[in-house]
């Protein structure tokens, strides 16, 4: 057994997908987002399950991710959301990937048989075009524009007007296109948050959840109108105890002596560190689950090892394992909790788990 590993439940991914599809309802297709190696859950295995569950579309960030799925035999449509068309001219027809266009000048460089989705920057100044409706109409007329999409900056923040203003901007562009006789088959705006918080006017007919597929939703800021998705994390992260020892009161622990034992203690040295993706910021503040109880991280998280307090769990020994993410009995830690303690976001915790950590499907 390795010193640290991930356990991913593909059944759970399938259940989360079904829950989302049921919530979206008929008339809306779910396009699970499997970019960044499916938020570290494993893009190939996750995509295979989702294809089996009936997903007609998957979304990735770049051409390499799309081609890897084709090489693994995935046959769904694949939307490439954050690359340039000219990065690899063969990707679109040969690998049958579908580009998202962010820059109207890219349209002319596409083979005329390739369908594309156009992203509108509706007010977050990130990807997507912010050209006027007239300019967009002139650029897309007579081309295979299959989808029109945008993305929201503040869709979990109900104290902000930004979502409403982005919705209005997008609707303005959509209407101008419609009046010019341009009606893309797909309209899509919803990642996890707009789905979860029931922002139905932005659902269109294609939904793009990533986070919820893996069992997470954001906490709303302010008063959310509703919360619809009851999804459950699919990933657990474990580490082996390499060594246990007793230390006396006054013993300094780890780099910089950032923790000093205030009493005689039993400590465990775990085979996981920041090179595995455990945030360095968890030093002296994070916790793990040891024998079904919370156990504090003591001192600095090192590159390869992390020390925890096992004073309350005398039965644990070298060779036993603890849980960094997941649950043991009633006690659980999910990526959101770890993120709060590390001063980051759960997305970054998940994507930050290093490829050094092997993955098992359970
Ligand atoms: C990553 C991404 C998503 C998925 O977002 P989640 O919050 O993980 O659901 C949807 N759309 C775009 C454009 C993205 O980049």
Image: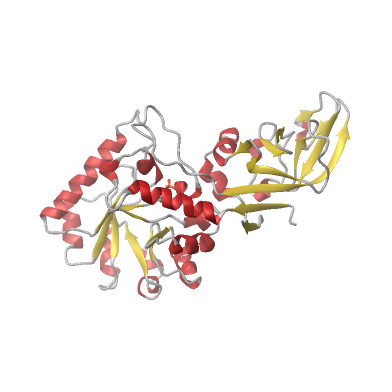
Q: Could you say which is closer to the camera, residue 266 or residue 292? A: 292
Colouring: secondary structure
Is residue 259 shown left or right of residue 60?
Answer: right
Is residue 12 shown left or right of residue 1?
Answer: left
Q: Residue at x 65, y 44 (%)?
A: 278
Q: Position of residue 240 (x, y in %)?
A: 75, 48
Q: Residue at x 48, y 62 (%)?
A: 47
Q: Could you say which is closer to the camera, residue 330 or residue 251? A: 330
Task: Write down the quadrant of residue 169 in the picture.
Answer: top left
Q: Could you say which is closer to the camera, residue 77 or residue 130? A: 77
Is residue 54 shown left or right of residue 143?
Answer: right
Is 214 above or below relative to 341?
below
Q: Position of residue 100 (x, y in %)?
A: 33, 59
Task: Write down the quadrant of residue 54 in the picture.
Answer: bottom left
Q: Could you say which is closer to the camera, residue 15 or residue 167? A: 15
The N terminus sits in image quarter: bottom right
Q: Position of residue 75 (x, y in %)?
A: 42, 70
The C terminus sits in image quarter: bottom right
Q: Position of residue 97 (x, y in %)?
A: 38, 68
- Residue 126 appears in the rendering: no
Is 171 above or below relative to 249?
below
Q: Residue at x 27, y 36 (%)?
A: 164
Q: Residue at x 46, y 57 (%)?
A: 34
Number of callouts: 0
Q: Residue furthest top?
A: 262
- Residue 309 appears in the rendering: yes
């Amino acid at each position: 057994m390795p010193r640290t590993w991930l356990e991913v439940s593909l059944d759970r991914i399938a259940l989360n997908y079904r829950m989302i599809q049921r919530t979206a309802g008929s008339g809306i297709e779910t396009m699970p987002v499997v970019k960044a190696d499916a938020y570290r859950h494993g893009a190939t295995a996750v995509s295979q399950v989702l294809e089996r569950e009936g997903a007609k579309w998957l979304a990735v960030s770049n051409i390499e991710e799309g081609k890897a799925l084709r090489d693994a035999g995935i046959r769904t449509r694949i939307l490439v959301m954050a690359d340039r068309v000219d990065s690899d001219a063969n990707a679109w027809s040969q690998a049958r990937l579908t580009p998202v266009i962010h820059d109207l000048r890219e349209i002319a460089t596409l083979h005329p048989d390739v369908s594309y989705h156009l992203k509108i920057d509706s007010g977050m100044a990130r990807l997507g075009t912010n050209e006027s409706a007239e300019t967009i109409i002139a650029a897309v007329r007579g081309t295979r524009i299959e989808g029109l999409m945008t993305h929201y900056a503040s869709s979990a923040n109900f104290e902000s007007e930004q979502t409403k203003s982005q919705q209005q901007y997008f609707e303005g562009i959509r209407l101008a296109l419609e009046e010019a006789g341009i009606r893309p088959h797909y309209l899509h705006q919803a990642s996890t948050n707009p789905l979860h918080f029931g922002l139905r006017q932005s659902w269109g007919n294609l939904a793009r959840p990533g986070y919820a597929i893996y069992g997470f939703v954001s906490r709303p800021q302010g008063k959310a109108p509703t919360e619809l998705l009851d999804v459950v994390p699919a990933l657990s992260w474990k580490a082996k105890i390499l060594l246990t020892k007793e230390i006396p009161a006054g013993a300094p622990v780890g780099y910089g002596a950032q923790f000093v034992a205030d009493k005689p203690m039993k400590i465990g040295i775990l085979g996981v560190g920041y090179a595995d993706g455990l945030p360095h910021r968890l030093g002296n503040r994070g916790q793990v689950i040891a024998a079904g109880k919370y156990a504090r991280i003591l001192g600095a998280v090192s590159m390869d090892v992390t020390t925890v307090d096992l004073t309350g769990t005398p039965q644990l020994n070298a060779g036993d394992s603890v849980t960094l993410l997941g649950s043991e009995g009633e006690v659980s830690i999910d990526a959101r909790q770890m993120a709060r303690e590390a001063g980051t976001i759960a997305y970054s915790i998940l994507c930050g788990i290093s490829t050094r950590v092997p993955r098992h499907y359970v």
